[in-house]
Image (tube, rainbow, N blue to C red):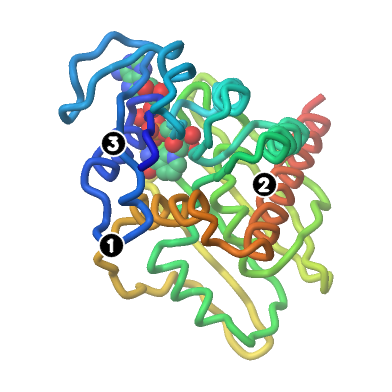
């Protein structure tokens, strides 16, 4: 068994604790047991799990794994501390708020022989799985993915990072991309922002990614994907699955810990994650350059 600790008790951290307490039976998630949680607040037991200090989490020999569920600005420091202490890490996306720090952390994990896993539950949703099947074999001409949602929480970083789940969709569907232009409109007093990134596929087909957030904007993804012989303007409703998204991710993490994921799969995943972070960096640079 691998003892684990959950760091950060927000929405994601609470789900992680629940899943660690009731892992999917006969899955790799059963190899993980929860030893405690770390929070900057002083909290009562959560779901029967005890709070422990960061120092204890980093030093206890029966803790082998950390699951980082804090706000995005503190992921990098938390990951580094746990890797330095010889613990495997699962971090909620985005791993960090820059490409170079993610490369550094991955190198550190490799030197230490530890698993560094970034959660991407958006790739596990039934709608995404169905969309991927629906577009299989189709030739893209152009497309738009427009995300809307409520105001961004503080400390979640530039929208190209906080919204990396949408970019990850585009990269998983259409392959590696390049950024041709990006801009950010922001009305801080109204808690409104709109980021627009123009991307090109390797076949030079244009994709537009928009992240728009503000009060009253419903959480939704609007798509307009034009193919040579078809247009998709609505997300397909995929088949609901009995296993929750975070549990599916925990099983994948558990399989990595058991050495049950092939080197080729790990390499492909790492390339995709680093590619997305590099694109996010570029989008941020271009947006900030455009505003300067
Ligand atoms: P959250 O705002 O619920 O929690 C973020 C951090 O804030 C946590 O460290 C938590 O301990 C702290 N926090 C929460 N309530 C607090 C309070 N009342 N006082 C002081 N601190 C408090 O955010 P979240 O949705 O859990 O997101 C955490 C991470 O998970 C982020 O990196 C996010 O990108 C990622 N993530 C979340 C989801 C999701 O469905 N919520 C999905 C995928 C990835």
Residue beneath the point at 24% across and 59% down: 25
* Mark 1: secondary structure: loop
Image label count? 3
Q: Is residue 37 left or right of residue 156?
A: left
Residue bearing the label numbered 3: 17
Q: Who comes first in sequence, dot 3 or dot 2?
A: 3
Q: Is residue 278 above or below residue 131?
A: above
Q: Residues within 10 Å of mark 2 (few under 14, many from 20)?
A: many
Q: Quadrant of residue 175?
A: bottom right
Measure the alpha-carbon separation of dots 3 and 2: 36 Å
Give residue 177's position: percent from left, percent from top.
77, 60
Residue extending furthest toward the bottom: 229
Residue bearing the label numbered 1: 26
State whether residue 181 appears in this view: yes
Give residue 274's position: percent from left, percent from top.
71, 47
Look at discs 1 and 2 and give the one toward the viewer. 1
Q: Is residue 47 left or right of residue 84?
A: left
Residue beneath the point at 48% across and 53% down: 258
* Mark 2: secondary structure: strand
């Amino acid at each position: 068994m691998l003892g684990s600790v959950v760091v950060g008790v927000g929405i994601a951290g609470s789900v992680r604790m629940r899943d660690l307490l009731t892992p999917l039976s006969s899955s790799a998630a059963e190899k993980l047991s929860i030893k405690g949680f770390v929070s900057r607040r002083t909290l009562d037991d959560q779901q029967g799990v005890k709070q422990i200090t960061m120092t204890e989490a980093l030093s206890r020999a029966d803790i082998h794994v950390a699951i980082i569920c804090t706000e995005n600005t503190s992921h990098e420091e938390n990951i580094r501390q746990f890797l330095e202490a010889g613990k495997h890490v699962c971090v909620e996306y985005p791993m960090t708020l820059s490409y170079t720090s993610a490369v550094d952390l991955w190198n550190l994990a490799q030197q230490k022989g530890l698993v560094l896993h970034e959660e991407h539950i958006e790739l596990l949703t039934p709608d995404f799985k169905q969309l991927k099947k629906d577009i299989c074999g189709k030739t893209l001409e152009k497309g738009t993915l427009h995300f809307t949602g409520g105001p961004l929480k503080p400390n979640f970083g530039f929208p190209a990072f906080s919204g990396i789940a949408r970019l990850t969709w585009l990269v998983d569907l259409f392959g590696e991309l390049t950024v041709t232009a990006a801009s950010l409109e922001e009305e801080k007093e109204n808690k409104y922002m709109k980021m627009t990134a123009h991307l090109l596929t390797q076949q030079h087909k244009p994709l537009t990614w928009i992240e728009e957030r503000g009060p009253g904007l419903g959480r939704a993804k609007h798509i307009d994907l034009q193919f040579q012989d078809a247009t998709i303007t609505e997300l397909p409703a995929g088949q609901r699955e009995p296993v929750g998204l975070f549990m599916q991710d925990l099983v994948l993490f558990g399989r990595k810990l058991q050495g049950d994921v092939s080197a080729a799969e790990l390499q492909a995943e790492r390339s995709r994650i680093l590619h997305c972070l590099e694109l996010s960096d570029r989008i941020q640079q271009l947006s900030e350059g455009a505003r300067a």
